[in-house]
Every structure is written in C-alpha cells, then in structure tokens.
Image: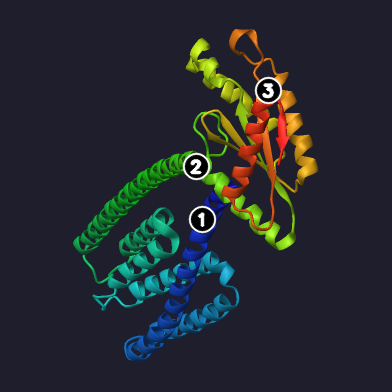
C-alpha cells in the first residue's frame, strides 16, 4: 500500500512542478505587460519631440500590452501562448526602436532585457533559440541599415558579449543541475540509510518484543513442562476466589502426585523422569478446559484450578485425568504403568489457597494410603 502511495506521489510531482512554473510565468508575464505598457507610455511622451513614429509605436505597444494582460488574466492556462506573443511584441518594439532611433546609443540595452525575459519564460533550450533569433535579427538589421548608429565593432562586441553571457548562463545551469542531481543522490542515500536503520530498528524491536514475551513466559511458566508456575497459579486463585465471593461461582483444586516417581528417576534416570513429567503435563493440557489453570506445583506434583466446578464435577474431572494418564503407556519402572494419585478440594466462603491446598493434600494422602492410582474428594 505504501509503495502505491509513493508511486502516486511521484507521478503527481511533475504536474505539481509544472503548475508551479506556470504560476511563476503567469506572475512574471502579467507584471511585465503592465510595467511595459507604463514604460511605453512614458517613453512615448519623452520621444515625441524626437520622432512621432516612435512615440506612436510606444502608444500602440502600450495598448496591445494592456489588452494582452487583460486576456492573460482571464485565461491563465494559456500562459505559454501569451509568453510567445509577448516576446514577439517586445521583439517588434525593440526592432522598431533600433531602426527608428539610431541617435539613441543605449537602445541595444533593451536587447538584454528581451533576452532575459525569453530565457525566463521559455526555459533554457527554447529561450536560447529565441535569443539567437533576436540577435540574428539585430545583425541583419544593422547590415541593411545605412546608419544604425553603431559601428560594426559595436555589433560584433555585442554579439560576443551576448554569446559569452549565454555560455555563462549554460555553465550556471549545468552547475545547478549537477548540484541538484548530487542533492537528489544524497537525499536518496539518506533515505536509504533511514530505511535501513528503520528496518534494523524494527528488527531490534521485534527481537526485544520476543525477548520480553520469553521473559514474561518464564515469569509465569515452569521451564520444564511449560505449565504455569506457583506465582501464576496464586494469581489465578485470587481471581477465581474474587469471582466466587461476588457471583458464587464454585471452583475446585486438583492436587496430582506421580506414583513412585523416585523409582523412575533411580532406575531409569532423571532424563526419563523429566520426559515423564513433560508427557503428564501434555495430558493435563489436553484434558482440561481453556478456562482452567494447570501448574507444576513442585517436583512431581501438579495443581489444577478447575473453574465453575463443584464437588460432583471435580470428581468426574479427576477420574478422567487419572484414567488418561494410566492408559497413556508412559515409561515406568519395573514394567509398570505410570499412574497418579489425585486429591481434590472445592472452595468454601472462608477458604484461602493455603486452606484449600491443605484439604486437597489430605485427600491426596488418603489416595496414597488407599493403594495409589486413585482419587479422593474432600
């Protein structure tokens, strides 16, 4: 999704840049037409004493410039067409002054103003051709005029200076383009570095979250069996007791002890003993509900908090767990099956975890005295 948005932004960028250029052209051209018309009127007043034709030419130029400014304001989308027309108009005025006012030695300065306007309005490439065309018209006009007021050296010097100016302008534009390209390259490199560091930071954050999750898991789970540990089961008990006190929802504890577990460790080794505990933990997870909490209480003892379970339901649950462990074909000592004893206790209003454990533990010992592999309910 971000890639599509980026592509869309890139496609809109040239349009935005073109719009910005057109707006600047519009502003420049609109002001140039108004300023040119004002200057033309002033110059017509000044030059009327020297040449009525030039004075009238200035007046005509001023009127045309005002008309163009009016239509440009109403049709700004045609700024490129108006720029061509304006350059042509200024070009005609310049040639008219060049031809009709040979006594004015400073009139060639208007050429540089016209050249600058052409370069700005038409850009580097098209503007260059406009300047060359205007410069060529000056040379041709000087060549055919009996007396232009300038010597051949003046014209050649003007041409050379103009060409030098264009070369300087081209070098400047090239330097700007190179700087712009270098800036873009630097920005791309910076963007890539930011992207890479962002990815690295995301990976680091992901690793940190995994580590936090692992630590959280270790905080509440037994490292061998994956069941809850004492800390978590104590929290679970406090929650269930609060639910019982408020809503009178019963729950029960199941205390489970592996029969003759010491013999498994002594005869088969602690590794087999650990495997046995892990397999029993898997059975407890499979045959208890999601709402129940199963924990390794210590050594070979397991504890289950069975939610919404009274003394009748806990008896059925305990028997189911005992039966599944007995028939799981777990490795045991002397060829015997692995079995468990289970003692249970159901909550009463005055109970604490300690009192319930005591009752469940008493029931567990009754099961052991009864020959093991059985359950007792308190």
Q: Nearer the viewer, residue 119 or 290?
A: 290
Tell me if 3 is positioned left or right of 167 in this view: right
Residue sitting farthest toward the top = 335
- Of 366 and 130, nearer the camera is 366
- The residue singled out by tag 2 in the image is 213
Query: Is residue 377 at least partly visible in the picture?
Result: yes
SS class, disc 2: helix
* In the image, residue 207 above or below residue 246: above
For disc 3, the neighbor class at 10 Å (few under 14, some 14 to 19, many from 20) is few
As displayed, is residue 66 above or below residue 220?
A: below
Q: Is residue 49 above or below residue 220?
A: below
Residue 2 percent location from the top left of the image:
56, 48
Please give the residue where the numbered disc 3 appears in the rendered image. 371
In this rendered view, identify the residue nearer to me: 256 or 86.
256
Labelled disc at residue 40: none
Question: Where does label 1 land, which residue?
Answer: 13
User: What is the distance, in whole Å, between disc 2 and disc 3 at their CAs?
Assistant: 43 Å
Q: For the C terminus, which image quadrant?
A: top right
Nearest the eye: 250 or 174: 250
Secondary structure category for the residue under label 3: loop
**Front label number (1 vs 2):** 2
User: Dot 2, crowdedness within 10 Å: few (<14), some or many (≥20)?
Assistant: few
How far is disc 1 from disc 3 in space, using C-alphas?
85 Å
**Of pointers 1 and 3, the one earlier in the residue sequence:** 1
Residue 2 seen in the figure:
no
Q: Nearer the viewer, mark 1 or mark 3?
A: 3
Residue at 45 percent of width and 41 percent of height: 215
């Amino acid at each position: 999704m971000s890639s599509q948005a980026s592509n869309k932004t890139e496609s809109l960028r040239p349009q935005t840049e073109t719009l910005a250029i057109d707006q600047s052209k519009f502003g420049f051209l609109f002001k140039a037409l108004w300023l040119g018309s004002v200057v033309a009127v002033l110059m017509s007043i000044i030059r009327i004493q020297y040449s009525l034709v030039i004075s009238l030419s200035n007046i005509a130029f001023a009127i045309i410039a005002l008309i163009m400014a009016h239509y440009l304001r109403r049709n700004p989308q045609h700024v490129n067409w108006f720029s061509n027309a304006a350059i042509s108009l200024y070009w005609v005025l310049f040639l008219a002054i060049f031809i009709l006012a040979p006594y004015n030695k400073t009139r060639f300065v208007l050429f540089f103003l016209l050249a600058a306007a052409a370069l700005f309005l038409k850009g580097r490439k098209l503007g260059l051709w406009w300047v060359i065309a205007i410069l060529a018209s000056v040379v041709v006009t000087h060549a055919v005029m009996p007396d232009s007021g300038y010597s051949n050296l003046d014209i050649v010097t003007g041409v050379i200076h103009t060409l030098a100016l264009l070369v300087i302008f081209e070098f400047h534009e090239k330097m700007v383009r190179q700087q712009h390209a270098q800036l873009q390259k630097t920005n791309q490199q910076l963007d890539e570095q930011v992207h890479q560091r962002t990815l690295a930071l995301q990976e680091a954050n992901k690793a940190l979250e995994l580590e936090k999750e692992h630590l959280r898991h270790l905080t509440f789970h037994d490292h061998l069996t994956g069941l809850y540990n004492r800390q978590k089961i104590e929290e679970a008990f406090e929650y269930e007791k609060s639910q019982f006190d408020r809503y009178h929802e019963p729950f029960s504890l199941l205390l489970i002890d592996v029969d003759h577990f010491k013999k498994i460790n002594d005869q088969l080794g602690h590794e087999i003993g650990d495997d046995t505990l892990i397999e029993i933990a898997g059975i407890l997870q499979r045959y208890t509900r999601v709402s129940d909490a199963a924990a390794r209480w210590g050594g070979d003892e397991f504890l289950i908090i069975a939610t919404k379970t009274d003394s009748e339901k806990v008896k059925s649950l305990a028997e189911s767990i005992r039966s599944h462990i007995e028939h799981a074909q777990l490795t045991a000592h002397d060829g015997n099956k692995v079995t468990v004893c289970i003692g249970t206790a159901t909550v009463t209003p005055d109970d604490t975890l300690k009192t319930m454990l005591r009752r469940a533990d008493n029931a567990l010992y009754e099961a052991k005295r009864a020959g093991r592999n059985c359950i007792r309910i308190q």
